[in-house]
Image (cartoon, coloured by chain):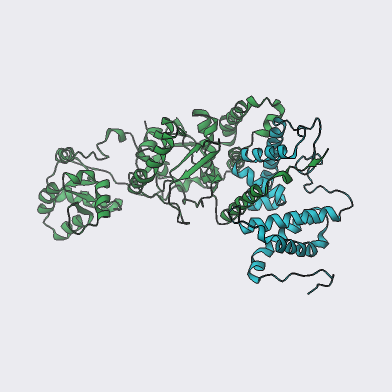
Amino acid sequence: MSKEYFTENISKETLAKLIDETLSYEKNKKGERIKMSNLFKIISAAAAVVLVIGFMNIMLPILSNVNVEPAGPEIAGTSSEEFYTPVVTDRGELFLPEIIEKSFFEDKILSVITDQKVAEKMQAYYTLKDPSASDLTDRAKEDMLITYPICRFNLIYALDPDISYREKDQLLSYIYEYTNITRSELIQMCVNIEYLPMELDERYKNVRFGKDYDTLLLDIEWYDYNTYFKEVYTPLMVQYNGAISSFDIPIEEVSRLTDDVALALIEEGMESIKEGKMYVPRLVNGKMNYHAFAVETSDISQFLDSNGYYIYNIYPYKPYIYYTDENGIKQYKYFYYANNELPVVNSKKEYDYLLKNEIIPYCDDLLAQGLITQLQYDYFTIQDPLNYFVSLWFD
Amino acid sequence: MDNMNGTPEINVNNSFYDKYNPQIRAIVARILNNANQTGDIDDCVNTVYLELMENLQQYNETRGSMAAFVTIIARSTALDYCRSNMRKPVELIGDDKIDFLSNPIESGSGSGFEDKVEFEMLVESILKKLNKEERVLFTMKHILFYSPEEIAKAMKIRRSAVDMRASRLKSKIKHFLIKGGITV
């Protein structure tokens, strides 16, 4: 008869791997300021997924070595933000298109503006997109064709994506004041170049946008502690119990085995809700919320506009995927760029590039290997994060 | 050069010493503190350096980092040091006297394993079933003997969460041992 310690029956190789993993984990944690709101994305995602998809898909990005820097507050707006709105005139409701066909811009707008400074301002914010221009690098040309595929067939002027609200209003007022363009002419121009502006897109007719199309205004009912315990924590525990019932463990032992990082974080998050330091959405625009986000603050009002809507920024966006590999181990792949700095997918343009060049090829491979389902593939390769949120909160 | 106790001191390359001495001392201190042998830390650290000198040729960087190698040597040296100097066995993890992770499991009939190799394979398979956070917690607590406060600080969680997670981890490992036929 001999005695064996559990830990002394670990091979040296495994021991070295465990130690290296731990040292690396410690090192990463030292440089990491984890916001509870980032962690809570997992918590609420866990709750939502349990309710909607199932236990095994709980997202746990903190398990990775990626340096998860905070993305900043969930919103950057202030309550006194002014918003861009189309101008309602006797010529119909005018709007500022993001792309304008070349001859339309030059003949109907530029050439009729008599004030030189105004014309220069229009040209400062609208840039000609010509893929055949001689001074374009191959990379610039590729980017242009990705961002504005229509310019392959029609030359266009594109609005500066970084234009502010105030400047947008100003340009629109110039179009109204200096031209005779009507709403129907604008619409026809859009049809001609197969461009559907947000203002005309039926998908967005019910959407409350903020200062731009990457900002949404949400009517939110926040969880209180008791409701969160009842509606999120308790069902999650039930799901855990159900999932491990096949182990034939006495029920009194089950609670000991239900720990997972997500559950432990949920419990910590519940403390924060109780103390009024964290806000988790329960209803968004009157519907149950299934998207994971939380706001870590003791003063939620700083994130609301003057009408009491929560200002939600779609970007920075952090695309990642998760799957179970052939050994049954959960794997996570993060696509946002770190460079040991802040993760950044700051715009739709950046996301488009990432989606085409990294996310889709990676997911294609996983799908071919049978490691993800078609449903997961469609979820991970979402074409436009905006549409995901619109369908979630405004449809 | 001998120190005042007559134990030979090892001259090591300064950069190696600067880099790894804090790590070595931390591991030795934790193990000896748990075994109430605080006064022998320097002596034990010197023994670690002796072991390192003797075993350095065994280091293979494909199997792990130098930091891991140093840690393993320091740990095993400190544990051996404790056992050889102790009049009676001391639990290195003191929160549960019937703790199968810090007390040995007896082999033989009824225990579930007769063969050490078989037990090793089971242990390795159980470790593979842990997720990363669980492996890190397991390593910090049962390999490196971090205190709960140190673990809380390293993992950036509350002290109470450490206890909760450690308890659940232990239950999980116990479950897999039982499922593997081991009596604990």
Q: Position of residue B104 (x, y in %)?
A: 79, 42
Asked whether, in this view, residue B154 is left or right of residue A71, the answer is: right
Q: In this orientation, which residue lies closer to the viewer: B72 or A30?
A: B72
**Residue A218 makes an appearance in the image:** no
Percent position of residue A231, x then y: 56, 30
Q: Is residue A245 above or below residue A211?
A: above
The location of residue A245, given as percent across then percent down, is: 64, 25
Between A173 and B129, the one nearer to me in the picture:
B129
The residue closer to the viewer here, A29 or A309, is A29
Tell me if residue B9 can be seen: yes
Decide if residue A349 is on the left or right side of residue A23. left
Toward which corner of the image does residue B97 lie, by quadrant? top right
Quadrant showing the C terminus of chain A: top left
Give the drawing colour for chain A: green
Residue B148 in the image, given as x and y percentages of width and height:
71, 49
Left/right placement of residue A384 relative to residue A61 reads: left
**Image quarter in which the N terminus of chain A is found:** top right
Which residue is drawn at the image coordinates 21% and 48% (left, top)? Answer: A172
Which residue is situated farthest in the bottom direction here?
Answer: B1
* Chain identifier for the cyan-coloured part of the image: B
Q: Is residue A100 above or below residue A191?
A: below
Note whether B86 is above or below A242 in the view shown: below
